[in-house]
Image (spheres, rainbow, N blue to C red):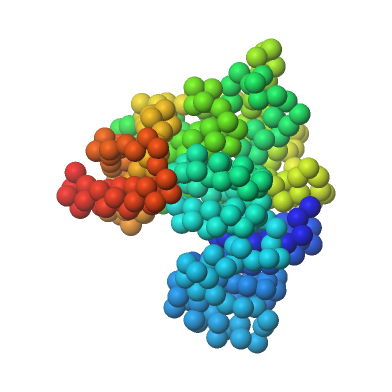
Amino acid sequence: MIKGLCILGSTGSIGVQALNVCENLKINVVSLIANNNIKLMEEQIRQYKPKVAAMQDERAASLLKQAVKDTNTKVLAGHDGIIEAVTHDDADMVLTSVVGIAGLLPTVAAIKAGKDIALSNKETLVTAGPIITELAKEKGVKIFPVDSEHSAIFQCLAGNRNRDVEKIILTASGGPFRGYTKEQLKNVTVEQALKHPNWSMGSKITIDSATMMNKGLEIIEAMWLFNVPVSKIEVIVHPESIIHSMVAFKDGSIMAQMGAPDMRIPIQLALTWPERMENPFRRVDFDILKTLSFTKPDLETFDALKLAYEAAETGGTLPCAMNAANEVAVDMFLKGRISFLQITEVVGQVMKEHFVNTKPVLNDIIDTDRKARELARTIINGGF
């Protein structure tokens, strides 16, 4: 089990649940990082007593510093403060749970400092998979998946050979609009899209689940985590969210990992692997659970999956452009600027107009992200 943990994104849904896991296992919390939630960060500092707390927002950092001046926690600000926090000598693992490409550069810094990574930030591998995996290999750093689907695959592959894998089967709940037609999706509201049937997540990830872009990002992430081509990755809709993903082997065997839809379970496994520790978290109740159902995803209605497969097959900077456009479009949907169906319309348009760099370095990824965001905003502001 790890000795000291840094949490990148401690005030978000995964960060809060990770702290609950740390409390249960008595894991030392070395550093906490957030954007601008001063109130919650102050509460976390007083409860978990980290050596360092960093805020992306410099004004928030200044206010936090005053609020916790009676503690021994050092408060840092901005990008440099975040890098100092993720590379702290007392942390041997960094949990990256911040949403979006904001997690990329801190994760790179943590890997360069030799920290193992508990990865909940999909966008790190989506945008820069080859760069991250090569850097981790070079530095001897382990990357442990935190997403329930990738944790399930990780567990199913344990003790098996990669060359025996026939396909990876990612399960998807289908989100709040499972079974809807395009016509029904035309007028869905933000409030409806944020009502996920099974999981408690942040707003951006919940919207991604509703469009099924979340599953698209997971397809690309799985390619890099498990070194498999996209042709071997399949998505199946499983509304109960009990089987978190499966691996089919060339002999016809299929291994599935089951568990209650509680993110603390895969978080804990990432922090303790190869040990499995006791906890008071939710369990599957087979007296209540009567059926497990599966259907193929509707790729015509939920075309985010098709876009993600296209980005994965093309590679280079296209996944980064797709992700950047999606982040902008989801934000605009949450603000009421565009409709639900226009999210993937924006993403598709940006992908069409993007010139793909097939062998990008880190600066190319950052540049692609910036340009794709600008293009997405131009498309939205122009009214399509």
Up-down relation of residue 253 to residue 203 (above or below): above
Residue 288 seen: no
Residue 22 seen: yes
Q: Quarter of the image containing the C terminus?
A: top left
Picture residue at 63% right of the left edge, 48% below the top = 139
Picture residue at 45% right of the left edge, 75% below the top = 58
Count of marks placed on residues:
0
Extreme residue toward the top, this view: 251
Q: Position of residue 293 (x, y in %)?
A: 59, 25
Picture residue at 46% right of the left edge, 52% below the top = 100
Taking 81 as reference, is 363 left or right? left
Taking 35 as reference, is 1 left or right? right
| Residue toward you, 101 or 335 | 101
Taking 194 as reference, is 92 left or right? right
Q: Position of residue 382 (x, y in %)?
A: 17, 49
Up-down relation of residue 127 to residue 220 (above or below): below
Up-down relation of residue 77 to residue 195 (above or below): below
Q: Quadrant of residue 149?
A: top right
Extreme residue toward the left, this view: 382
| Residue toward you, 109 or 2 | 109
Q: Position of residue 3 (x, y in %)?
A: 77, 60
Q: Position of residue 251 (x, y in %)?
A: 69, 12
Up-down relation of residue 276 to residue 20 (above or below): above
